[in-house]
Image: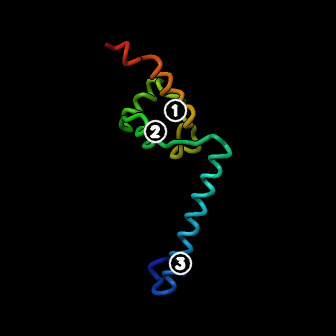
Amino acid sequence: MPARKHRDGADLAEWEARKQRRVEQMDLARERAKRLSGHTLVRLIEAAAMLGITPKTLRELEADGKLPPRVTFSPKVFGWRLADMEAAVEARMGAVRPDDAA
């Protein structure tokens, strides 16, 4: 049977259980790959949330060259290495200290 809408009863429950197992396997594989590679990528919304800004502001910072370069896999699939973003935040925090502003 091709899709969920054509299933009912026990067939639907079995299909949903298999789907959930596949999702869990993919999540587990993703986590393992992140731990092994050390190259976790954050997407646009995640990077903006990490910096406490909007996605639009993030794009503006990127255009101004104030962010590390993004990693691009295709025109619609891109992100930033988490380590690069953390280094950029650390660098900015070191440049302006709250004690110095007063």
- Mark identifier at residue 38: none
Mark closer to the chain start, 1 or 3? 3
Q: Quadrant of the C terminus?
A: top left
Please say if 78 is above or below 32. Answer: above
Along the line of sight, the residue nearer the viewer: 51 or 5: 51
Residue most extreme to the bottom = 9
Tell me the amino acid under the disc marked 1. Answer: Met
* Image x and y of residue 54, in percent: 35, 37
**Is the C-beta separation of discs 2 and 3 under 8 Å?**
no
Graded by Cα atoms within 10 Å as few (under 14), some (14 to 19) or many (20 or more), the crowding at tag 2 reads many
* Image x and y of residue 85, in percent: 52, 32
Residue found 48% across the figure and 27% down from its top: 89
Residue most extreme to the left = 102
Tell me the amino acid under the disc marked 3. Answer: Trp
Q: Which residue matches tag 3? A: 15
Check disc 2 and report its element: helix, strand or loop. Answer: helix
- Mark identifier at residue 85: 1
Residue found 46% across the figure and 24% down from its top: 66
Please say if 100 is above or below 50. Answer: above
Check disc 3 and report its element: helix, strand or loop. Answer: helix
The CA span between labels 1 and 3 is: 40 Å
Q: Which residue matches tag 2? A: 47
Check disc 1 and report its element: helix, strand or loop. Answer: helix
* Image x and y of residue 30, in percent: 60, 53
